[in-house]
Image: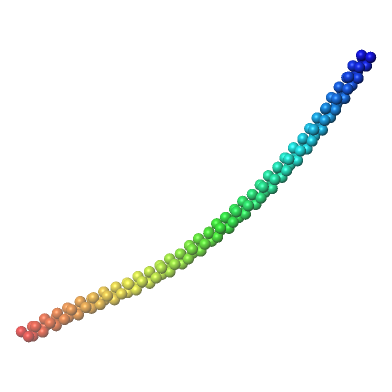
Amino acid sequence: ERLAAENLLFVKRLQQSESARAEAERERAELQTRWREQTEEWFRRATDELQSQLLVDWGTSGAVAAELQQAREEAAAAASEHAREAAGAAEREAALRKALDAKSEELAGAWTESGAARERCEQLQAEAEARAE
């Protein structure tokens, strides 16, 4: 009878241990499921946020690249315009120098002529004075 009681107690404890082990396994599976769901949701949100941020960054970099390209085009157009203006100024300067050289030659000729005329006047005046004496 004592042996039967010990056996019965042993079987009861074994059943309780088996029940506690099954409960612990069920709880572990439940915790793993909840953890997986939470981490999957976190990774899904993180992925969505990262993708959204990348799209914003790519859009921003695209806009910056477009602005940079536009600035380059504007700078090239301005440089081309400046080159045209410089070429025009060089042509005007060359024309002015040519006109100045022509005027200088004209003035030199006039100066030479005026000098010759002055000498002729002085000569005529000297002749007139010599006749008058």
The one nearer the camera, 47 or 126, is 47
Looking at the image, is 44 positioned above or below residue 67? above
Image location (x, y in percent) of residue 62: 60, 55
Looking at the image, is 96 positioned above or below residue 39? below
Q: Quadrant of the C terminus?
A: bottom left
Residue that lies at the very extreme toward the top in this rendered image: 2
Residue that lies at the very extreme toward the bottom in this rendered image: 132
Residue that lies at the very extreme toward the right in this rendered image: 1
Image location (x, y in percent) of residue 6: 90, 16
Residue under the image location 78 percent in, 38 percent down: 33
**30 on left or right of 82:** right
The one nearer the camera, 28 or 110, is 28
Residue under the image location 17 percent in, 78 percent down: 119
Image location (x, y in percent) of residue 42: 70, 42
**27 on left or right of 132:** right
Residue under the image location 43 percent in, 69 percent down: 88
Q: How is the image coloured?
A: rainbow
Residue under the image location 69 percent in, 48 percent down: 48
The one nearer the camera, 81 or 62, is 62
Looking at the image, is 56 positioned above or below residue 73? above
**30 on left or right of 59:** right
Kindly indicate the quadrant of the structure image that contains residue 17.
Answer: top right
The one nearer the camera, 35 or 43, is 35
Image location (x, y in percent) of residue 121: 16, 81
